[in-house]
Image: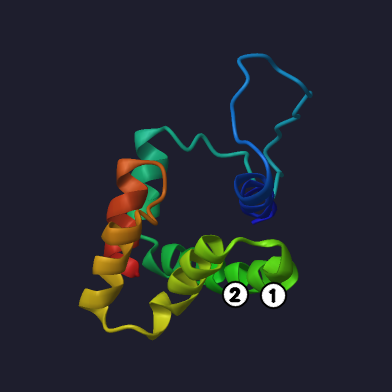
Amino acid sequence: MHDWWIILVASCFGLISSLDVQTIQYRQHSNNSIGAADVRSLKYQIHKMFRADEIRAAINKTYPQAQCFLDTYYEKLRKEQIELIKKYVAIPNLPKIQRIRTLFREDFFKNSFARKIAHIIFV
């Protein structure tokens, strides 16, 4: 969730880009709470597909975080940014078909195909 917060700040107030160079050393080990799994492996993807409760919980955590972001930076955001965040925060209160329409209309999808499908199913 901390990565998502940083991306929100960068996208609203700065610039997002990627570097093809390693800038820090990131240590992975089997006891990591986050990041130790190979998320590109078929085994991981299959496992995730059958963990609907985890997927739904992860998606549902983004709405209060977006509201917190809006509350924190409201005075510094442009009108269009405020409206977009409000649309995202409102998603859980919409009927299912409107939630899906909003995902498509505003392009609120995650970055991979599997995550897009999961978002449609579990939104």
Q: Residues within 10 Å of mark 1 (few under 14, many from 20)?
A: few
The residue drawn where x is 27% and y is 54% is: 117
Q: Earlier in the sequence, mark 2 or mark 1?
A: 2
Q: Is residue 77 left or right of residue 122?
A: right
Secondary element at image label 1 = helix
Secondary element at image label 2 = helix
Q: Amino acid at mark 2?
A: Pro
Instruction: Name, please, the residue furthest toward the left.
Output: 97
The residue drawn where x is 30% and y is 73% is: 99
Q: Nearer the viewer, residue 49 or 1?
A: 1
The residue drawn where x is 41% and y is 79% is: 92
Above-or-below relation of 88 to 32: below
Q: How is the image coloured?
A: rainbow
Q: Which residue is mark 1?
A: 71
Q: Quadrant of the N terminus?
A: bottom right
Estimate the spatial distance between the alpha carbons at disc 2 and disc 1, rounded to whole Å: 10 Å
The number of numbered discs placed on residues in the rendered structure image is 2
Q: Amino acid at mark 1?
A: Asp
Circle 2 or circle 1, nearest the eye: 1
Q: Residues within 10 Å of mark 2 (few under 14, many from 20)?
A: few
Q: Nearer the viewer, residue 119 or 89?
A: 89
Above-or-below relation of 117 to 43: below
Residue 57 percent across, percent down from the top left: 49, 70
Residue 59 percent across, percent down from the top left: 47, 65
Residue 3 percent across, percent down from the top left: 66, 48
Above-or-below relation of 103 to 47: below
Tag of residue 64: 2
Q: Is residue 69 left or right of residue 106?
A: right
Tag of residue 86: none
Q: Nearer the viewer, residue 33 or 23?
A: 23
Q: Nearer the viewer, residue 106 or 119?
A: 106
